């Protein structure tokens, strides 16, 4: 015999069906919420009433941002937050890899606490690069401007016309140096900001002629002959203004770091969807140990020589940026005392 009548049984059945449906909705909501939490790039750790971790999102698990040092700091913050105290801590981990993490402990209204783990490593790296860059620029401009001040003071103390003329010539040189650095900085930031915007069919022959035209005066002064190996090169895809700037910088270096009367050759080869523009010189060459660093801003192998030749230390940084903007690459082969070969690879035109 049943404890319940038929109507009561029917009522119970329908209540059970409703509860099951509600449970399914709740489970679905929980799954969705979990997926949302798992997609959040910062790490989240939820604690019970005593501050003991009960739930972690993937970046807050071991192997993500977390190791035992971070784990200890998170647990301390959670215990304090579960007791009502909000806290924040920055961890500078030496690594490798070096990381900077910001940890926050937040008390929750219904008890328990939430810890947030934010990875600031990339932001810290960019801040360091920016600070370094500003320090470099200041140094690069301070040198010619300081020299200008000293020369101007010396002029003021002299009445001999020949001495004054000599000092004035050096003042012009220093002013040109400051102005070249500013020009290259503007060019570099234009190329960095301009990014990949322009993609048009580029006549590589025109790019090379324009770049040679820009370098002609310096080449003439050193009696250096620039030869173009292929007068009808293939067409490329990209930004002709940026490409002229890159090739002109390579040519400018080839001339600057070669002896009087030397030869510089520009050649172009099309292969598998790429166009390789090569600038080869028979100049002083680059020591192997410096090859990895020459594309950094303001890096020079020989400061004195670069200063003598009016180098800004930014030319190859410009070339590398142009290559990156085109999805290409710049490579160098060099031997001290024998010469250097720089190859700029950019996409070929599909036409
Ligand atoms: P810079 O204005 O000093 O020439 P770059 O960024 O153009 O600066 O080049 C960085 C350094 O790489 C130069 O200071 C020089 O030491 C070296 N370098 C670049 N091109 C050549 C080259 N063709 N031959 C020898 N050394 C070169």
Image (spheres, helix red, strand yellow):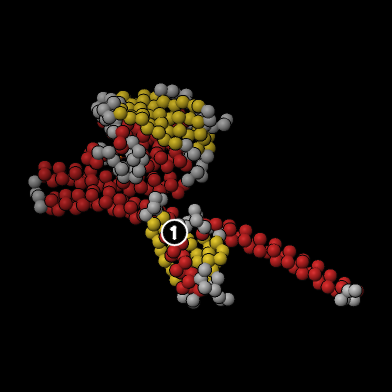
Q: Position of residue 190 (x, y in %)?
A: 42, 47
User: Residue, x 28% and y 40% (percent of image)?
Assistant: 300
- Quick check: can you spot residue 251? yes
**Which of 56/40 is in front?**
56
The C terminus, quarter of image: top right
**Residue 5 figure quarter:** bottom right
Q: Position of residue 239 (x, y in %)?
A: 48, 39
User: Residue, x 41% and y 35% (percent of image)?
Assistant: 330
User: Residue, x 51% and y 34% (percent of image)?
Assistant: 347
Q: Position of residue 142 (x, y in %)?
A: 25, 52
Tell me the quadrant of ligand 1: top left
The N terminus, quarter of image: bottom right
**Residue 87 figure quarter:** bottom left
User: Number of marks in the image?
Assistant: 1
Element assignment for label 1:
helix
260 relative to 67 in the view: left or right: left
**Residue 210 figure quarter:** top left
**Which of 287/244 is in front?**
287
**Which of 263/271 is in front?**
271
236 relative to 94 in the view: left or right: right
Q: Is residue 136 above or below residue 308?
A: below
List the residue tagged with mark 1.
68
The outermost residue toward the front is: 1
196 relative to 306 in the view: left or right: right
User: Residue, x 52% and y 73% (percent of image)?
Assistant: 50
Badge 1: few (under 14), some or many (20 or more) residues near its Cα, within 10 Å? few
């Amino acid at each position: 015999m049943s404890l319940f009548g038929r109507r009561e049984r029917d009522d119970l059945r329908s209540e059970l069906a409703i509860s099951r449906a509600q449970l399914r909705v709740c489970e679905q909501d929980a799954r969705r919420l979990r997926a949302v939490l798992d997609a959040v790039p910062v790490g989240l750790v939820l604690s019970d009433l005593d501050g003991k971790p009960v739930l972690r999102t993937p970046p807050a698990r071991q192997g993500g941002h977390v190791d035992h040092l971070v784990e200890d700091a998170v647990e301390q913050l959670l215990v304090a937050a579960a007791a009502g105290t909000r806290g924040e801590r920055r961890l500078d981990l030496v690594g490798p890899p070096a990381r900077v993490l910001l940890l926050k402990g937040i008390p929750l209204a219904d008890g328990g606490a939430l810890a947030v783990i934010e990875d600031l490593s990339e932001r810290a790296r960019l801040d360091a690069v920016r600070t370094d860059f500003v320090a470099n620029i200041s140094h690069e401009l301070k040198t010619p401007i300081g020299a200008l001040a000293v020369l101007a003071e010396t002029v003021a103390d002299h009445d001999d016309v020949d001495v004054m003329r000599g000092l004035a010539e050096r003042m012009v040189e220093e002013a040109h140096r400051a102005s070249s650095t500013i020009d290259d900085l503007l060019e570099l930031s234009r190329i960095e900001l301009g990014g990949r915007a322009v993609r048009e069919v580029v006549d590589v022959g025109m790019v090379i002629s324009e770049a040679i035209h820009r370098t002609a005066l310096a080449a003439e002064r050193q009696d250096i002959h620039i030869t173009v190996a292929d007068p009808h090169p293939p067409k490329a895809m990209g930004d002709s203004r940026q490409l002229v700037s890159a090739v002109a910088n390579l040519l400018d270096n080839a001339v600057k770091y070669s002896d009087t009367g030397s030869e510089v050759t520009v050649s172009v080869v099309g292969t598998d969807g790429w166009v390789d523009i090569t600038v080869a010189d028979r100049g002083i060459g680059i020591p192997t140990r410096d090859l990895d660093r020459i594309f950094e801003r303001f890096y020079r192998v020989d400061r004195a020589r670069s200063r003598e030749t009016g180098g800004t230390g930014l030319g190859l940084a410009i070339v590398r940026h142009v290559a990156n903007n085109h999805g290409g690459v710049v490579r160098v082969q060099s031997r001290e005392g024998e010469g250097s070969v720089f190859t700029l690879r950019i996409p070929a035109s599909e036409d």
